[in-house]
Image: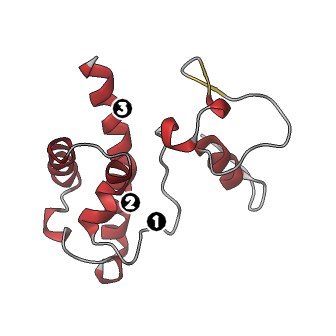
């Protein structure tokens, strides 16, 4: 858990861990015995949900959820399996063709969580398939 007052740098810390920023000084961050800072962001497979969800407004719910898998060129078969699992888990199957501006706050939250979980699910598949 990361706690701190408004403006104390909590978001910058999370974005640095995810790879959106490179620290100018300080300790190297280790994650699962790896030098996290030496990995490019796309290899870190870390996702988090912003308070305002940061969904891509020009993409449907389905496209938002699978975005990370598509840019990693994951096979359609795996994408479809992950999508089915996540929409079932978050109970959002009926939302797949909607755009973010047509969702309630709770629906946006579930979509954002599914998108973040999608990469975590990918890690699990890759780990177990070795």
From the viewer's perspective, tell me whether residue 65 is left or right of residue 88. right
**Residues marked 1 and 2 touching at CB (< 8 Å):** yes
Q: Residue at x 23, y 76 (%)?
A: 98
Q: Which residue does the numbered mark 1 point to in the structure image?
A: 53
- Residue at 54% x, 21% y is 32
The mark lying in front, picked from 3 and 2, is 3
Percent coordinates x, y for residue 68 in the rendering? 38, 51
Is 11 placed above or below 16 here? below
Category of crowding for the residue at label 2, using alpha-carbon neighbours closer than 10 angstroms: few (below 14), some (14–19), many (at least 20): many
Q: Give the number of the mark in front: 3 or 1.
A: 3
Pinpoint residue 11: horizontal percent, then vertical percent. 66, 54
What residue is shown with label 3?
Answer: 123
Relative depth, front residue between 50 and 4: 50
* Sequence-earlier tag: 3 or 2: 2
The residues bearing labels 3 and 1 have C-alpha atoms spaced at a distance of 22 Å
The circle on residue 112 is: 2
Decide: few, some or many residues near mark 1? Use Cα within 10 Å; few <14, some 14-19, many ≥20. some
Q: Residue at x 70, y 53 (%)?
A: 12
For this rendering, which residue is in front, 89 or 26? Answer: 26
């Amino acid at each position: 858990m990361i706690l701190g007052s408004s403006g104390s740098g909590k978001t910058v810390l999370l974005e640095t861990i995810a790879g959106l920023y490179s620290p100018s000084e300080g300790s190297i961050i280790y994650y699962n015995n790896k030098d996290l800072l030496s990995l490019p962001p796309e290899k870190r497979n870390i996702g988090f949900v912003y308070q305002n969800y940061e969904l891509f407004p020009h993409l449907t719910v389905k496209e938002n959820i699978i975005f990370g898998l598509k840019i990693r060129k994951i096979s359609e078969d795996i994408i479809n399996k992950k999508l089915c699992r996540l929409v079932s888990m978050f109970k959002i199957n009926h939302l797949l063709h909607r755009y973010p501006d047509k969702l309630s706050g709770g629906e946006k939250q579930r979509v954002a969580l599914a998108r973040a979980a999608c990469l975590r699910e990918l890690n699990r598949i890759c780990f177990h398939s070795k």
